[in-house]
Image: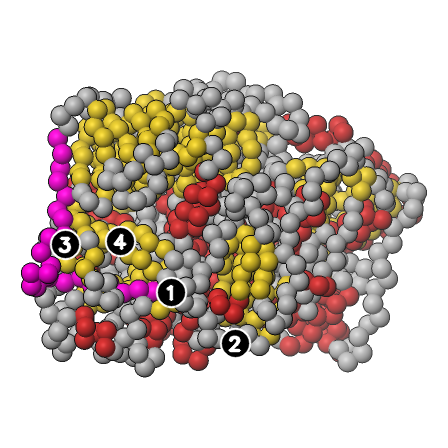
Amino acid sequence: MAPALHLLVVVAAAALAVTEASTSAFAAASNNATAPPPPPPPPTVVAGKLNVHLVPHSHDDVGWLKTVDQYYVGSNNTIQGACVMNTLDSVVDALARDPARKFVVVEQMWQRRRPTAGTAAASRRVVWRRRRSLAARGGHWDGLLDPSVHGAPPLPRWWTWRPSTWVTGGSVATGGSGMRMPVTGSSRCFLPRSFAATRRRRGSSMRRPTGLGDSGRGVLAAPARKDVTEDEWPLRRRGSAPVYRARTAEVGVRDVRVEAFFQRWWAEKSPTIQAIVHKLVDSGQLEFINGGWCMHDEAAVHYIDMIDQTTLGHRMIKKQFNKTPRAGWQIDPFGHSAVQAYLLGAELGFDSVHFARIDYQDRAKRKADKGLEVIWRGSRTFGSSSQIFTNAFPVHYSPPDGFGFEVLDEIIPVQDDLSLFDYNVEQRVNDFVAAAIAQANVTRKNHIMWTMGDDFNYQYAESWFRNMDKLIEHVNKDGRVHALYSTPSIYTDAKHASNESWPVKYDDYFPYADSTNAYWTGYFTSRPTFKRYVRVYSGYYLAARQIEFLVGRNSLGLFTSSLEDAMGIAQHHDAVSGTAKQHTTDDYSKRLALGASKVENGVNTALTCLTSSNRTCVSSVTKFEQCPLLNISYCPSTEKASSATKSLVVVVYNPLGWERSDFIRVPVNDENLAVKNSDGTIVESQLVEVDNVTDNLRKFYVKAYLGITSDKAPKYWLIFQASVPPMGWNSYYISKPTGAAYNGTGYVSAVVSPSNDTIEVGPGPLKMSFSSASGQLKRMFNSVSGVDLPIQQSFLWYRSSEGDSMDSQASGAYIFRPDGNTPTTVSSSVSLKVIRGPLVDEVHQQFSSWVYQITRLYKNKEHAEIEYTIGPIPIDDDIGKEVITRMTANMVTNSTFYTDSNGRDFLKRVRNFREDWDLQVTQPVAGNYYPVNLGLYIADGKYELSVLVDRAVGASSIQDGQLEIMLHRRLLKDDARGVGEPLDEVVCVGEDCEGLTARGTYYVNVEKIGHGAHWRRTYGQQVYSPFLLAFAHESEHFLQEETRWKSYSVPEASMMDANYSLPDNVAIVTLQNLDDGTTLLRLAHLFQAAEDPQYSVLAKVDLRKVFGKRTIKELTETNLSANQKKSEMKKLNWKVVGETENGPDPIKGGPIDSQALVIELGPMEIRTFLLKF
C-alpha cells in the first residue's frame, strides 16, 4: 500500500474510533443527565514532595498560517494540520471518561455574520462585476475571497500554490500528490502524518512548516499568466490590507451568529452535549482561562481594544456558565506589557497571569535566581494595589521534551503492559522525575507547572490523557515526586498557600529576543496599513456605540454588534501584530470590512433619526453617506456639484466628552464655495490644491479598493474649522455663495517661492523654519510659550539583514535585524513647496520618488501635523528596507526616552539598559526599539519634545536628542519564525502591480519641561477618536438653502446638559447598549500619578449631567470586564522579597452615592458600571 494511502487509512480509523467513543461517552453522560455523577475528588497536593501540576491545553490561534474558519473546520491542511472542532469534540469526550481529568479553554471567539447560500452567490456576482465596495484608510485588501466562507470557485489558474491547494466540495485537492482527502466529516478532520512538522512554532525548537520553499518568498507565487476572465477572480492584489467593504444591501448578509472555536463549537452542539459540558465546567474539569475573544497581542494593540475583546468573551462565559475566569494565559504574545499586568490582569479579577515569551537573557538570569515567578507591579501609579502573580515558563508552552503525546507526533508512549516487549514504565518514570527535578531547580517552592500541550493539539485527546493517566499513576506509585491534573487556578492557589516571598517585577517585558540577533521588534511596525485599519475602526466602533446609545434601543437595535466580533479577532497576537500569512491577513481585513459596512449603514440611519425633528428614521430630506477613503481625496458626496439652492450638509459627530474644535478637510471641485454653521453664521474657509501624489494614489487605490475607475480627482481640499459639543453633533452647510454677505469668506491658498535662506511658516503662534537651500526643517518656536528649539527631521532606511556567515538570522515579519547600525538617508536635499493661508500653512517636501511629506501648521494649534506617504519601497536592488523618520533636537537626554504602554502609562526607557539584568548589547538598534501606540517623548532640563502616532509603530531614541519611528517595512526574506513568507506586500490592479504604499500622520509638539503631558493626553484622545463625518445633499424639492433643511432637523445637540463637559483628565472609553437591557459605561482617568501637577488629581463626573434628560434607575459598579460586581472581587495577598513600597497610597475614587451619582476617579483609574435607564 502506498505510504500516503496507508497513512490516510490509519488516520481515518483513528478518527472513526474517536467518533464512536465520543458517541458512547456522550450517550452515557446523557443517560445520567438527571442524576449528576458525584463531583471528582479535588486535586491533592502532597506536602514535603515536589508537586508536578499537569495543565492540559491546546494553543489555538485565531488565525495565523490559516484563516479562522480553516483552523476550525480543518481545511487547507497542506499549510498546517489543525482542526479545532476535532480538538473540542475529542477533549469533551476524554473528560467525560474520567472525572479526574482536566483541560483549560482560552479563546472564545465566534463570528456573528455568515452569508446565506443566496448571499454567497450574490457576493460572488458583486466581486466578479467589480462592484464590491472596498474601503480603508491607508491600505488595501487582497481581493481574494475565502472559499470556505463564500463558497467561491477554486483560485484561478494564474495563482500557483506551493503545493497548489484549495477547498472544493468538502475535500482538499493537494497539487503535490494528486490525492484528495476529506477535511470535514460531520465534525471530524483527517490529518496526514507530515503535518506534525507544522505544529511547533516560533520557539527555540520551532520547525518551519513543510511545503514551503527555502527561499522564503512565500506560498503564493507570482502568476505566470496575467489574463483573467470575468469568470475568474478579477481583483489580483496581494498585500496587507485594509479594505473590503461589502454593500450589505446588495449581498444580503443576514445577522446570524456563526461561531468559531469554543463559542462556535458550543452553538453547534445539541442540548444533551451542552448539558455535559455544563457539568464539566461546574465540576472544574473544564476551566475557562483568559476568556477573551482571542489571546490578544500586547505590543500593537490599544488598551480600549484589549478591554473590549476581553469583555466580549467574559460576558459570554458569564451568560452561559456563570463563571468568571481567574487566570490570565498570554502564553504566545511576543513580549508583555505593563497594561496587561495591572489592567487586563488585576483589574479583571485575575489572580495570576502565565506566559512563555521573555527575553533569553532575562530568562537565563531568572532561572539562575529562581525568579521566573514574580509579583508583577505593572503600574507605578497603583503599585501593590494592582499587582498580580506572574509565571514565566522555563522554556516554552509545550511539555518537557519527551512528554508530548499528540497522536501524529513522534511520541514515547507510556507502555505499562508487562507482556509488551517495549514495556517502559521505569524509564518513563525516571525521565519524568529527572525533568521535574530540573525544573524545580529553577523554581521556588515545591510546585511546578508542566504545560501539557502545544499549537492545535488534542485533536485525538485520548492519546494525551491516556498517557498522562499512566504517568500520574506510576509516578505517584514511585513516590519521589507527586503528579496531578491541574489548572492555572489550582497551581496559583498552591503557590499562594506556600507563604513564600516572591521577587517584584516592575513595568514590562519588552523588548523580547529569543537569541543574540533575533529581537522581535520588527512586528511593532509590520503591515502598517493593516495596523492603521484596525486603529481607525477602533475609534469608529467607540463612536458608533455612542450613537447607537443616543438613538435608543427601539429604533435600530444593536447594529454595532456586527463589528465587535471582527474587532475582537483583529486583536489576536498574529493579527494586528502583522505576523500572519498574507491570505490570513486578508481574511482579517475582510471580516473588519463586512462588520464595518453594516455599522456604517446603522450609523447613517441613526444620524437620520437623531437629526430629524420628529425622530423619524426614514427621511426624504437627507440620506447620509460616509467617506472611508477621504485620506486619498475620494468622497463622492463632497465632489458632487453644489448650488446656491442645494447645500451639501455635513454632520460632524464628536465622541469626546468635552467640546471640541478641529479642522475638517473635504475634497471639492469648485473654488466658489461658502461654509455656514448651524445657526447660519459664515465660517471662514480655505482652499488648498490637491497634490499630485494624492491624485496618483487616488487613481490607483480607488481602482484597487473598489474595482472601478474613479472620476477625475477633485481640484481642492476645502478646509474649515468645526466646533462640536461633547458627545454630540453639529451641522455645516457647503454651497455656492449668493449675495454680498458671502464675499471674501473663502480663501484660495497661495504658493510661496522662498526668497531668503530660511522660510518661516505658521499662521498662528507656532512657527517652523525650513532651509530654502536643503528643504529641511531647522527650528520650531512658539511666540506664546517661549519655546525655541533647533530641530531637524529626515527619512532614512535600515538595510534588512538576510543573515551572515556567523548567524543566518534574517529580518522578517517578527524580527528586526538591520544590516549595520547606521541607516541610509533617503535624501539630504529635498524639494520644497510652501502654501500659505489664513487657517493652515503647508510645507510639501519630496524626499524621493517614493517618500513624500506634508507638514501642516493650523491656526491656533500647538503642534505640527505631518502626513507622510511612503511607497512603493523600491527593491529592484534586491535590498529589503525598513523606513524611519528621525527627529534630531539640540537636547541632552542622558540616554532616556519615554514610550506609552498600550496607549495608557508612559514608561521610562534607558538605552542599552534593562532594570532586571545586566544587558549584553548585541543589537544596539533593534534591541532599543519599543512598541508605541499613543506616542513617545524625550526631555531635558528645558524642553519636552513629543510625538503622537496614528497607529501602532516601533520607535526608539538611538542617540541623545533623537527620536526615530519606523513607519514602513518591505523585506525579501522570511525570518524563520513559522510564517514562511517575506513581508513583501504587493498591490495589483490588472497587470499593474506595485509595492504597498503607506500613508499616515504623526504629530509633533514642543513644550517647556513639565508642560507636555496635557497635550499628549488630550490631543492623544483626539487622534484616537476623530470626528465622525456624514454627508448628505438636500433633496431637490427644497428650493431654499439650508434653512429649509434646518426646519426639518435638529442641526446641533449633545447628550450632556448644556454647558457641562467632562474634565480634561477624564474620558468615556465605553458607552454601549448590551443585549440584556443594560448599558455599559467606562470612565478613564487619563493621567498618571505625578504626571501633571494640575491634572494628576482626583476628578469628578456628574452622571446626571452626563446623561442629560435620561434618568438612571439603577447603577452597579463592576470589574473591568463587567462579569462580576466590584464589591465581590477577591484578591490574593502576596508576600514579596524586600518590600520597599513606601510612597503615598494611590488616589482612588470613593463609593458612589446613589442619589448624587457623582463618580470620582484617581490618576489612571478606570471605573466600569452597568446602568439601567
Q: Is residue 296 above or below residue 842?
A: below
**Mark 3: secondary structure:** loop
Which residue position holds label 3? 745
Note whether residue 293 is visible: no
Of the two numbered discs 3 and 2 on the same chain, state the one appearing first in sequence: 3
Q: In this view, does 17 lie to the left or right of 1019?
A: right
Name the spot of residue 494 as percent of width and height, x first: 82, 49
**Relative depth, front residue between 844 and 519:** 844
Name the spot of residue 501 as percent of width and height, x first: 81, 39
Which residue position holds label 4? 721
**Relative depth, front residue between 1106 and 775:** 1106
Which residue position holds label 1? 728
Q: Which mark is residue 1111?
A: 2
Q: Distance between the residues labelled 2 and 4?
A: 34 Å
Q: Residue at x 42, y 25 (%)?
A: 962
Amino acid bearing label 3? Thr
**Mark 1: secondary structure:** strand
Q: Is residue 223 left or right of residue 1147?
A: left
Magenta segment boundaries in residue numbering: 727-753
Of the two numbered discs 2 and 4 on the same chain, state the one appearing first in sequence: 4
Q: Distance between the residues labelled 4 and 3?
A: 13 Å
**Mark 2: secondary structure:** loop
Of the two numbered discs 4 and 1 on the same chain, state the one appearing first in sequence: 4
Q: Residue 46 carries which label?
A: none
Q: Do the residues labelled 2 and 1 touch (CB within 8 Å)?
A: no
